[in-house]
Image (cartoon, rainbow, N blue to C red):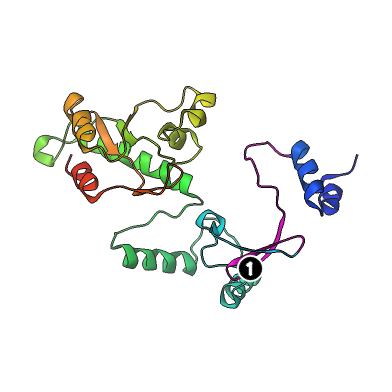
Amino acid sequence: MPTLTEAAASTTTLADLQSAESTLMLQTYARYPMQLVRGQGVHLFDEQGTAYLDLLSGLGVSALGYGHPAITAAITAQAATLLHTSNLFYTAGTTELALRLTEITGLDRVFLCNSGTEAWEAALKLARAHAGMLRSLSPEQGGKPVGTRFLALEHSFHGRSMGSVATTHKAAYREPFQPVMPGVDFIPFNDIAALRDAFTQTPNAYCAVVLEVLQGEGGINPVSAEFLAEARRL
């Protein structure tokens, strides 16, 4: 039986890749039957050299395109200088990125992480921790009887970790891993009446309304300004 390295070296055609992945990898995603070998600008190329206009952008990761000389030079220079040290040490790039992000967003601080799912998990934890802090304070100190539940929207998608999948609406994503994180309720998308009812029927239950401002998997659906304003007020 060939080693993994030998198998990888021999998988040069689409059929080879499909055969190897069917035995080597968990079948989490249904892949489109195409082998991509390189990218240039806004185009991707398959093994036959056919060019495709990239409208996915690597799910947002490759939004600046492929092969840009400035980006390639920056990555090459950094890889040759200092590729990774972990967050146990200081590096100038981390501080510079944090500064730029606070300037762009107007927020005070940033939390750097590896994926959208990890960012979502951090947001859920921050909401619960903030609610716990408010419960621990007296009314004179600004304390409030805030609950621990999350109010999410139908047709949402937030990731596949236990917290993020619990706030994802599609049952097929949640059911294989039941019981997922408890304390999540769903209301119809952009339904302000349902939003108000949730807070009226279960007062002081929620520590956060969790939502995508622009739904992706559920369809390209923007949350209305009215819904956002009411969610913040409540």
Image quarter in which the N terminus is found:
top right
Q: Which residue is mark 1?
A: 79
In this rendering, the answer to whether 31 lies above or below 187 is below
Residue toward you, 163 or 134: 163
Asked if the stretch drawn in magenta spans residue 183, the answer is no
Image quarter in which the C terminus is found:
top left
Q: Give the farthest residue toward the top.
A: 179
Q: Is residue 204 visible?
A: no
Amino acid on which disc 1 is placed: Ala
Residue toward you, 71 or 58: 58
Which residue lies at the image location 76% right of the left edge and 60% below the top edge? Answer: 47
Which residue lies at the image location 23% right of the left edge and 32% below the top edge? Answer: 194
Q: What's drawn in magenta, residue-wise?
A: 25-48
Which residue lies at the image location 12% right of the left edge and 41% below the top edge? Answer: 141
In this rendering, the answer to whether 200 lies above or below 30 is above
The image quadrant that residue 201 belongs to is top left
Q: Give the farthest residue toward the left.
A: 140
Residue toward you, 224 or 91: 224
Which residue lies at the image location 58% right of the left edge and 59% below the top edge? Answer: 85
- For this view, does 178 lie left or right of residue 10? left
Percent across and percent down for residue 105 are 32, 62
| Mark 1 closeness class: few <14, some 14–19, many ≥20 residues within 10 Å | few
The image quadrant that residue 148 belongs to is top left
Percent across and percent down for residue 210 are 33, 40
Q: Is residue 180 visible?
A: yes
Asked if the stretch drawn in magenta spans residue 28, the answer is yes
Q: Give the farthest residue toward the right.
A: 1
Look at the magenta stretch and give its main secondary structure: loop
In this rendering, the answer to whether 31 lies above or below 171 is below
